[in-house]
Image (cartoon, helix red, strand yellow):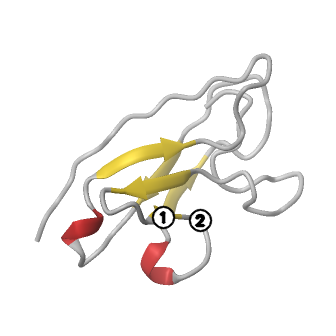
Amino acid sequence: CKNSIAYLDEETGNLKKAILIQGSNDVEIRAEGNSRFTYSVLEDGCTKHTGKWGKTVIEYRSQKTSRLPIVDIAPMDIGGAEQEFGVDIGPVCFL
């Protein structure tokens, strides 16, 4: 992310601009709320608009295979001048 908040907004201290994720059964996976539908953040390097590229690493774990795969990712802090956002999908493990 560049000039875009991915999880915690350092300026406000809240998660209102945190990414939303949608599972295949249309469930929204959020930064906060019901623990069954929240993701974890392993690294948050996108907390303020610095003009530099940052990286946020999100992890989602579930016992419900119907929630996977992830079908949509909605960054909330995009659309402004000089804002950029990209996604790399990491390994998936089904146990």
Residue kind at label 1, given as amino acid type = Ile
Look at 60% across and 78% down and name the residue there: 33
Query: In this figure, which residue is indicated by the disc labeled 2?
Result: 31
Position of 72 compared to 20: left or right? left
- Viewport quadrant of the N terminus: top right
| Label 2 to label 1: alpha-carbon separation | 7 Å
Looking at the rendering, which quadrant does residue 94 occupy?
Answer: bottom left
Q: Where is residue 75 shown, x and y percent of the image?
A: 60, 41
SS category of the residue bearing label 2: loop
Residue kind at label 2, given as amino acid type = Ala
Q: Tell which tag, 2 or 1, sits nearer the viewer.
A: 1
Position of 67 compared to 55: left or right? left
Identify the residue at the far top of this view: 82
57 vs 31, nearest the viewer: 31
Mark 1 nearby-residue class (10 Å; few <14, some 14–19, many ≥20): many
Position of 71 compared to 42: left or right? left
| Picture layout, residue 76 above or below residue 31 | above
Q: Where is residue 95 shown, x and y percent of the image?
A: 11, 71
| Picture layout, residue 95 above or below residue 42 | below
SS category of the residue bearing label 1: strand
Look at 47% across and 54% down and name the residue there: 21
| Picture layout, residue 49 above or below residue 74 | above
- Residue 29 - label: 1
Mark 2 nearby-residue class (10 Å; few <14, some 14–19, many ≥20): many
Do the residues bearing badges 2 and 1 touch, measured as CB atoms within 8 Å? no
Look at 52% across and 61% down and name the residue there: 41
Position of 36 compared to 83: left or right? left
Q: Where is residue 27 shown, x and y percent of the image?
A: 42, 65
